[in-house]
Image (spheres, rainbow, N blue to C red):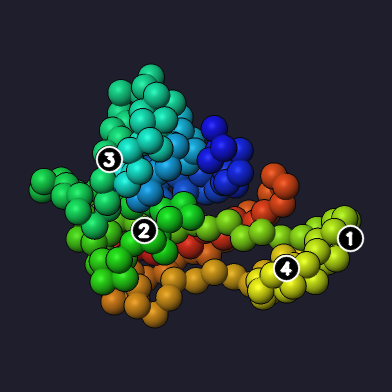
Amino acid sequence: MAFDRTRPVCPEELFDDLVRLDHLVTGKRVVEVGAGTGQATLPLARRGLAVTAIELGPELAAVARTKLARFESVTVVTGAFEDWEPLGATFDAVVAFNSLHWVDPQLRYAKPARVLRSGGVLAVARCEWARPAEAQPFWRDVQEDYRAVGVEGDPPPPPEAIGPNHLPPEARDHFDEVAALRHPFAKESGTTWPTWGRSR
């Protein structure tokens, strides 16, 4: 599927850190915001977590259901995170991989805080494209072509130039940041920046 081929997948080390730092042992309950085709759901399920994966797109959710069918502890819900209700259930973690920025700003941090148990964890990861030192000159040369068609910007920076990603001020009413980690990995190129916050 084109979605899986073109969107970066977080490296295994990120999921290992998530489980280790947050003591997410087998059976712990996790909500995933914007699961897509289940690219991040699969490593969570492999680690024995009970995942409620929420995906707005019906076609993407259908792919995720097929991909995750062998995991009885995974439920894929089609719909918006903003509209989804846990029906009184609480969760050990809410995770978002390249998706939290799509959630309504009024609910982006308030809703995860509401569905988490006391001391539960919000883990947010995003992939930033990076240009390694040995990158082809194309990355630099093509910028003039982009500008010619009205696209402003610079080529991706080298990995070491990408600064840390922290929870923004609006999240601080609900979460205390406990870790901000960096996981460089190669696809074409990419760097994942996960940030953890613990609910109050």
User: Separation of disc 3 and disc 1 at Cα?
Assistant: 42 Å
Q: Which residue is mark 4?
A: 146
Please tell me which of labels 3 and 4 falls first in the chain.
Answer: 3
At horizontal 35% and vertical 77% (from top left) the residue drawn is: 170
For numbered disc 2, what is the local secondary structure?
strand
Residue 187 placement: quadrant: top right
Closer mark to the observer between disc 1 and disc 2: 1
Residue at x 36% of width, y 31% of height:
62
For badge 3, the amino acid type reads Thr
Q: Nearer the viewer, residue 50 or 130?
A: 130
Q: CA distance from mark 4 to mark 1?
A: 15 Å
Amino acid type indicated by mark 1? Pro
Crowdedness of circle 4 by 10 Å Cα count: few (<14), some, many (20+)? Answer: few
Residue 23 pos. (x, y %): 40, 46
| Residue 79 horizontal/vertical position (percent) | 26, 46
> Which of disc 3 and disc 2 is earlier in sequence?
3
* Circle 3: element type: strand
Instruction: Name the residue that disc number 2 marks.
Output: 122
Residue 199 drawn at (x, y percent): 29, 64
Residue at 35% from the left image edge and 73% from the top image edge: 171
Q: CA distance from mark 1 to mark 2?
A: 39 Å
For this orientation, the residue located farthest to the top is 70
Q: Disc 2 or disc 4, which is closer to the eye?
A: 4
Asked whether, in this view, residue 11 is left or right of residue 194, the answer is right
- The residue identified by callout 3 is 78
Query: Foreground: 151 or 51?
Result: 151
Comes first in the chain, label 4 or label 1: 1
Disc 3/disc 4 C-alpha distance (Å): 36 Å
**4 vs 1, front mark:** 4
Q: Is residue 165 toward the left or the right of residue 121 in the image?
A: right
Instruction: Check if mark 3's residue and mark 1's residue have beta carbons within 8 Å.
Output: no
